[in-house]
Amino acid sequence: LSQFIRNEAFLNKVVSAEEAASWIEDGMNLGMSGFTLFGEPKEFPLALSKRGEQENFKVNLYTGASLGPTADQSMAEAGIINLRVPYQGNAIMRGKINNGEIYYIDQHLSHTAEEVRKGSLGKIDYAIIEAAAITEDGLVIPTGSVGNSPIFVEKAENVIIEINTTAPKAYEGLHDIYVQKAQGERKEIPIYNTGDRIGEIGIKVDPAKVKGIVLSEQPDIPSPLFEPNEETQKIADNLLAFLANEVEVGNLPESLAPLQSGVGSVANAVLNGMQKSQFKDLEVFSEVLQDGVFDLIDAGIVKFAAGTAFSLSKKRVDSLAEDLEKYKDKIMFRPQEISNNPEVIRRLGVISFNTAIEVDIYGNVNSTHVNGTKIMNGIGGSGDFARNARITIFVTSSLAKNGAISTIVPFVSHIDHTEHDVDVIVTEQGYADLRGLPPVKRAEKLIEIAHPKYKEQLRAYFEEAKEKVGGQTPHILEKAFSFHNNLKENGTMLFEDDKIKH
Ligand code: 0RQ
């Protein structure tokens, strides 16, 4: 035990997960570590969920981002969550949010720490943080994510630390914990290069606040492996063609600019594609580091990658301890308030690419809601990057649900990223570079990359809107959701021929 808890002040605090769970009361606010299934406590939430099966209580759960089966899922199933903030991605939890059993605040991931600091989410009763070790100096070493753990620990009345004895030793030294000061005491965040180290290797905690230490042997849960398929490959090829053109015309060097990539299949296909590209000496300034980043480091193409969390497949989880030793000086995790910070994103000139659910003909992007109503996951960090990046790219397949849905529509049913934030849209049909174009010209470009079976319908709407209504951004409001209404009534966005002509 003394190799994990190296400071005596903490040694006599070890308790069972059940005992720690028994301290939680109805209505409490819990700040938990964890981000994209990495770095979340596991024994504690399982014990709390078990208690919830016998007793009636609910808590508000704040985290970095999405948690996995042992936390988000087990707690949702046990019915013990009142409010969830700021991101989730679990099917069971999503269902309960959409049927009204759980409240959810879908928040920019760089904002949550400041909301906690300001007190607008209430006081944090307990911070529950997974750790690889507690050092001699009393620093808590996080595991595969930092997320919002520093602010939760700072503001919490009580802290529970879950030491994961299976965590790779090389986590120690990987993190760069810089905590933003309160308003009035702030200076610039001194990151001028992706790899600048500005903080400590762990989270400072007052031993008096640590009420208990729980031990865990549960490893992190791997994410699915996203192998490129024909479609995601085409989207990736189109995005890479856009970047290659930027290099060719002299807008970007071959090292591009620090990259942020969303999670999922297209992001992985793009990173895969970069292995065979002309780009070199790349840097990653992102939120989540997935398999593709390690592959690019292996291939000598990425020279440094900073983020706030891993999201890795089984293969990379299995080799993580070895990879971390190998790449210790090439990878860094910061709190999400810093990894996603607008000031730093703007200073470094990040190129960002994230996935859209739907895009409208003027370039507004919906990343979160199906048919304007049902939440999918959340905005995550996509807004932090989209508003502030040097080039903001969104990718999507032009069709969803076997062609019943066109992802390019007259008007998005929910707006996460406005036309003012969006530079380039990429589908398997090509890319639309919207930079420097007014709305009516953006529409021309966007209709070009819609699926051929929906192009005529989109063009008919656009032409009618220009002719009958006109204006800066032509819309016929009665028909702006005609695609969505048709989907609801007929199971497809595709009109019969006579409707296209209106
Ligand atoms: O449905 O799961 O039933 O098959 O949406 O779509 O194509 O598998 O794509 O997994 O990359 O998810 C935007 C949701 C895309 C994700 C989103 C249906 C589709 C499928 C998933 P099924 P795909 P992905 C970094 C940045 C927001 C957060 C973000 C996301 C399912 O990327 O949550 O960017 N992004 N964070 O069939 C109805 C449409 C649809 C649709 C797709 N127009 N209408 N259903 N689907 N388009 C990460 C973090 O911040 C942590």
Image (cartoon, helix red, strand yellow):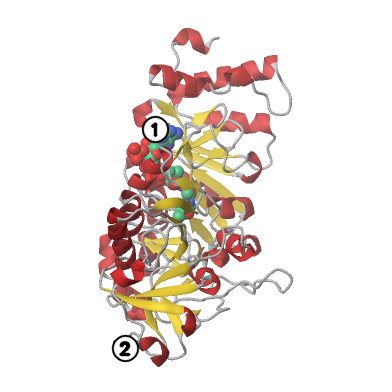
> Which corner quadrant of the image does residue 54 belong to?
bottom left
On the image, the x and y values in percent for residue 3 come to 31, 88
Q: Work out which quarter of the rendered image holds the N terminus and state it.
A: bottom left
On the image, the x and y values in percent for residue 47 come to 29, 64
On the image, the x and y values in percent for residue 73 come to 32, 52
Specify the label residue 3 is tagged with: 2
Tell me if residue 142 comes above or below residue 265 in the rendering: below
- Out of 306 and 127, give the one closest to the viewer: 127
- Out of 298 and 305, give the one closest to the viewer: 305
Residue type at mark 2: give it.
Gln
Specify the label residue 149 is tagged with: none
- Residue 331 can be seen in this image: no
How many neighbours does mark 1 have within 10 angstroms: few (below 14), some (14-19), or many (20 or more)? Answer: few
Tell me if residue 74 comes above or below residue 366 in the rendering: below
- Helix, strand or loop at disc 2? loop
Tell me if residue 63 comes above or below residue 101 in the rendering: below
> Which corner quadrant of the image does residue 21 belong to?
bottom left
**Image-based side of 415 in relation to 325, left or right:** right
> Which corner quadrant of the image does residue 495 belong to?
top left
- Out of 199 and 240, give the one closest to the viewer: 199
**Image-based side of 409 in relation to 120, left or right:** left
- Residue 465 can be seen in this image: yes
The residue tagged 1 is: 400
**Image-based side of 463 in relation to 367, left or right:** right
Q: Work out which quarter of the rendered image holds the C terminus and state it.
A: top right
Q: Give me the residue at 56% from left, 17% from top.
A: 460
- Helix, strand or loop at disc 1? strand
Image quarter where ligand 1 lies: top left
Distance from label 2 to label 1 (Cα)?
51 Å
Q: Is mark 1 within 8 Å of ligand 1?
A: yes
Q: Give me the residue at 43% from left, 22% from top.
A: 487
